[in-house]
Image: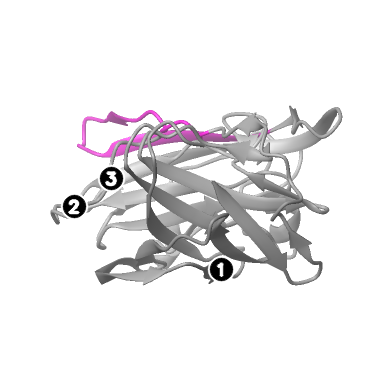
Amino acid sequence: MLLLAGCGLAQTNTVGEVEFAHRLRVPPLAGSHLDDQGRRVFDLRAQAGSTDFGTGGKTSTWGFNGSYLGPTLRAKRGERVMVNVVNGLAETTSVHWHGMHLPARMDGGPHQPIRPNATWSPTWTVDQPAATLWYHPHPHGETEKHVSRGLAGMFIVDDDTRVNLPREYGVDDVPMIVQDRDDTVLVNGTAGPYLDVRTERVRLRLLNASSARVYNFGLADDRPFALVGTDGGLLPTAHGTSRIRLSPGERAEIVVEVQPGSG
């Protein structure tokens, strides 16, 4: 069970303060298909909705292919991908591939707005080592608003390197998108989450998707874990630690030794 100590514009410490009573939601893997040009094609739709975070009623939110957050995109190094992004919102947005090595015209920054009801279909070849990346809007002056409302998701890059790491998505390889709504910390949109584990090692892909809060991640019992990856991808060797601090936009991959059946 991960405990979070937040610092930045406000101080929040979950140690002994949060009841972990809600099963962790795991974003689904995005469906894809190969087109007649051999490209792996994904479809994303930015849309408005409402979400119950378990904190007292529904809240107006945005999401990709749902009411909050987006599915996890996954592709392999060397693949050519295309993402059809439809803007179903009433205002202009964009989608930026944070950490991806790709041409500027496919980057999705403020210079590439997507108008309401318009579709943008960037295409590029994945050409970087295995890494945990993410996607989010980047409209000029509106990035914080769009991301905090829920427009964010992970993009996992795989390669052919053989490493002894957990790799079954949602079982022992789990994405954890951490955001805050006021003083409530959410993981994948879940307040006070727990994760049932069935393996002796769990790989957690941590993403600080908050706009201003810095998190200090650790385990309740201060047990050590292995830091195996950062923003740029997997490390040459694992680094043992019991705490890791992530600023907004940063990612880290850690492997935790656990007791199967524990939360």
Question: At which x and y percent is residue 88?
Answer: 66, 33
Q: Is residue 259 magenta?
A: no
Residue 137 visible? The answer is no
Q: Which residue is mark 3?
A: 166
Residue closer to the observer: 237 or 131: 237
Which residue is found at the position 72% from the left and 70% from the top?
7
User: Disc 3 and disc 2: Cα gap in Å?
Assistant: 7 Å
The type of residue carrying mark 2 is Asn
Q: Nearer the viewer, mark 3 or mark 1?
A: 3
Task: Name above or below for residue 133 compared with residue 194.
Answer: below
SS at badge 2 = loop
The local secondary structure at tag 3 comes to loop
Category of crowding for the residue at label 2, using alpha-carbon neighbours closer than 10 angstroms: few (below 14), some (14–19), many (at least 20): few
| Residue 170 falls left or right of residue 47 | left
Give, as a three-letter code, the residue at label 1.
Answer: Leu
Q: Identify the magenta region.
A: 26-47
| Nearer to us in this view, 23 or 118 | 23
